[in-house]
Image: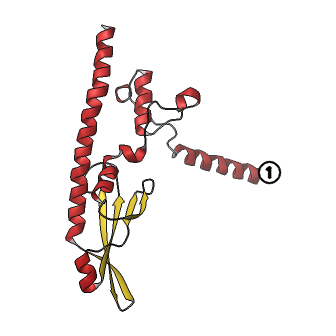
Amino acid sequence: MKINQLKILTILLTAIFFLNSCNFYKRSDVKDNPVNVDERVRENIKEGRGIRFGKGSVRGGTFDFASANPLWRASIEVLDFVPLTNASYSGGIIITDWFSSQKDQEENNRELKLSVRFLTNEIRADALKVIVFEKKCIQNNCKTKKIKSKLESELKLAILKKAALFEKDDFKKYRETEGKKRGNSVIKKK
C-alpha cells in the first residue's frame, strides 16, 4: 500500500511541477492592460489572442491576411515579371518558375529561379530571405545550384521599399477614415 501511495504522490508532484511551468497564470499589471473592456478586446484581437462565439465571432468589414500584409503585397508586385509556381501566404514563401532573359537562353542555356521566404511580418532588413537558384543545361545535362547574386539584395531592397510605401499609404488611409470617425465620436460625446 505504501508503494502505491508513494507512486501517486510522485505523479501528483510531477504533474504540479509541469503544470506550473506551463504559464497558465501570467501576472499582469493594470498599467499594461486597458481597463475598458472594448479596448482590451480590440488589443486581444489585434494580437491574435482569444476566442469569440456567436455574433461576436464575425468581424466587421472584409479582412484578408495576404492583402493586409504590406510585405506580401510588395513581394507579389515586385515579382510580377516572372510566373510563380508557389505563393503560400500561410507557409510564408513565394517560389517562382524557372525564367531567363532571351540573351541568356540563346548564349548559355542559363535559367534562374527565385525563392522569397518571410521570416517576419514586420518591415525590416531581416524580414525576408531571397534565394537565387541557377540551372545550366548542356545537351540535356542540367545542373542546378544555389548562387550568390546581386539580384538577391536588389530584390530584397525593392520589396522592402515597396512594402514601406504600402504601409505608409495604408496608415494614411486608416488615419483619414478611422481618425475622422473617432474624432466625430469624441465631438458628439462632449
Residue at 59%, 29% in the rendered image:
54
Q: Residue furthest right?
A: 1
Q: Position of residue 146 (x, y in %)?
A: 32, 76
Say above or below: 17 vs 106: above
Side of 35 where 15 appears, left or right:
right
Up the image or down, 114 lies above or below 185; here it is: below
User: Which residue is disc 1 drawn over?
Assistant: 1
Number of numbered discs overlaid on the protein picture: 1
Residue 140, by quadrant, is bottom left
Q: Is residue 4 left or right of residue 60?
A: right
SS of the residue under disc 1: loop
72 with respect to 10 (left or right) = left
What is the x, y in percent for residue 67? 38, 45
Quarter holding the C terminus is: top left
Task: Please determine whether, in this image, residue 137 is positioned above or below residue 125.
Answer: below
Based on the displayed image, in which of its 4 quarters is residue 180 positioned? Answer: top left
Residue 63 position (above or below residue 81): above
**Residue in the foreground of this view, choosing between 7 and 185:** 185
Binning the other alpha carbons within 10 Å of mark 1 as few (below 14), some (14 to 19) or many (20 upward) gives few
Q: Amino acid at mark 1?
A: Met
User: Is 112 left, or right, of 86 in this rendering?
Assistant: left
Q: Position of residue 20 (x, y in %)?
A: 53, 43
